[in-house]
Image: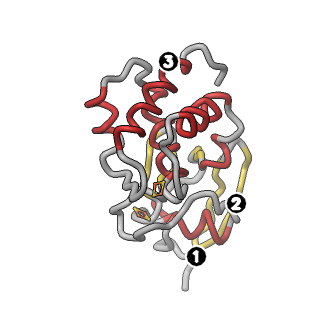
């Protein structure tokens, strides 16, 4: 099968891969580039466990063909966010508020929270719920997730990025 080549900046590092254009971005990230922090839940666009940032926007990586992501695109996966102070703030807030249990949804949840708080540091509950509406968590009550994000928001603006 015909392959396409792409070079992307992922987590501030250039990475190249060749793949059939219809291969899912999730599979290229996890299997070809060994970035296994991004999780597969449903594989059908219904849980957001596989969320990554493409040019700063959250993208459901199981729904997008890797060939649709242009050469030179900038991506952030949860591994890249882990190098930032704001991700640590989010992670601490999730733990402190009891918003993480089995942890399966957490990589996608953290990526969504990071994208959301990057543009809104003073969110109300409704905005938080809307921004995370696609992120399914089977363990934790969403009230705790909302509390965690509000807690992170209070520290966010003072943090280094
Ligand atoms: S694995 Fe992508 S949305 Fe569920
Ligand atoms: S903490 Fe288990 S699915 Fe969210």
Residue picked out by circle 1: 3
Where 36 sits versus 106, above or below? below
- Residue 16 sits above or below residue 133 on the image: below
Q: Is residue 93 above or below residue 7?
A: above
**Residue 97 position in % (x across, y down):** 50, 35
Query: Which residue was labeled with disc 3?
Result: 154
| Disc marking residue 24 | none
Element marked by disc 2 = strand
Query: Please, is residue 122 above or below residue 117 in the view?
Result: above
Q: What number of labels is visible? A: 3
Q: CA distance from mark 1 to mark 2?
A: 13 Å
Left or right: residue 145 versus residue 126 is: right
Quadrant holding the N terminus? bottom right
- Camera-nearest label, 3 or 2: 3
Q: State which tag comes first along the sequence, 1 or 2.
A: 1
Residue 102 in picture, x, y percent from top left: 53, 58
The residue located at (47%, 53%) in the rendering is 51
* SS of the residue under disc 1: loop
Residue placed farthest to the top in the image? 158
> Which residue is under mark 2?
16
Query: Which residue is located at x 36 percent, y 69 percent?
Result: 44
Alpha carbon separation for disc pair 1 and 3: 46 Å
Disc 3 secondary structure class: helix
Gap between marks 3 and 2, in whole Å?
38 Å
- Residue pictured at 65% horizontal, 63% vertical: 36
Where does the image place residue 98, in percent across and percent down from the top left? 50, 41
């Amino acid at each position: 099968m015909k392959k396409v080549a792409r070079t992307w900046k992922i987590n501030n590092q250039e990475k190249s891969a060749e793949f059939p254009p219809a291969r899912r971005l999730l599979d290229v990230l996890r299997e070809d580039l060994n970035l296994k922090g991004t999780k597969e839940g449903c594989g059908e666009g219904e849980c957001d466990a596989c969320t990554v940032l493409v040019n700063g926007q959250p993208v459901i990586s199981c729904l997008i063909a890797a060939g649709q992501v242009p050469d030179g695109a900038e991506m952030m996966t949860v591994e890249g966010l882990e190098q930032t102070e704001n991700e640590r703030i989010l992670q601490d807030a999730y733990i402190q508020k009891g918003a993480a249990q089995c942890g399966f949804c957490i990589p996608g949840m953290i990526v969504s929270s990071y994208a959301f708080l990057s543009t809104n540091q003073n969110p109300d509950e409704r905005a938080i719920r809307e921004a995370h509406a696609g992120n399914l968590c089977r363990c934790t009550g969403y009230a705790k997730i909302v509390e965690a994000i509000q807690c992170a928001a209070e520290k966010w603006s003072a943090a280094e990025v």
